[in-house]
Image: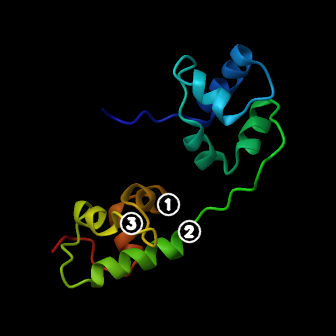
Amino acid sequence: MARQAYSDTQILQALRAAAALTGEPMSHSRYDAVAGRVTGPSSARIIQRFGTWRSACTAAGVTTGATSREYRPKWDSSTVAAAVAAYLAWEESTGTYTDYQAWARGHSDRPSGPTVRNIMGGWNEAKSAAGRDVTPR
């Protein structure tokens, strides 16, 4: 199944529609409970797009409750590039995304394949940022 791409406008409309269904303040869990009915992405995807839940709700004109904690992403482009470089330097590396996923799986000190793609824009971009050739070996 192909992943649905949502524009910022569609995301904000989904937040407004969810607030109309559930009432305000809008929380992640309230939104996720109705996301399918309002044709919107998950709250995690909204946070990735807008940086914070509060920023997304503010842009949509929807109130949100008090923040329980400030989200600090574990990975940024430099730490992801370093992890990809470590994988590519590994003697058994094939240089493929699938092989990277297997290498990273089960290791909390390695970003997952989807995290690499989300932060870097794609596997070839991640390999380029790691200073490596983008063609698989």
Residue 4 vs residue 26, the one in the foreground: 26
Question: Would you say the residues marked 1 and 2 are in contact, meaning their CB atoms lie under 8 Å apart?
Answer: yes
Left or right, 96 with respect to 109, comes to: left
Task: Give the Cα distance between marks 1 and 2.
Answer: 7 Å
The residue located at (69%, 56%) in the rendering is 71
| The residue positioned farthest toward the front in the image shown | 106
Quick one: quadrant of the N terminus?
A: top left
- In this figure, which colouring scheme has been used for the structure? rainbow
The residue located at (60%, 46%) in the rendering is 49
Task: Give the Cα distance between marks 1 and 3.
Answer: 10 Å
The image quadrant that residue 130 belongs to is: bottom left
Tag 2 secondary structure: loop
Left or right, 14 with respect to 75, comes to: right
List the residue tagged with mark 2: 76
Between disc 1 and disc 3, the foreground one is: 1
Q: Tell me the kind of residue under disc 2.
A: Asp
Looking at the rendered structure, which numbered label has been put on residue 125? 3
Quick one: quadrant of the C terminus?
A: bottom left
Task: Give the Cα distance between marks 3 and 2.
Answer: 14 Å
- Mark 1: give few (<14), some (14-19) or many (20+) Cα within 10 Å: some
List the residue tagged with mark 1: 119
The residue located at (29%, 79%) in the rendering is 88
Vertical comparison of 124 with 83: above or below: above
Residue 121 vs residue 1, the one in the foreground: 1
Between disc 3 and disc 2, the foreground one is: 2
Tag 1 secondary structure: helix
- Mark 2: give few (<14), some (14-19) or many (20+) Cα within 10 Å: few
Residue 46 vs residue 74, the one in the foreground: 74
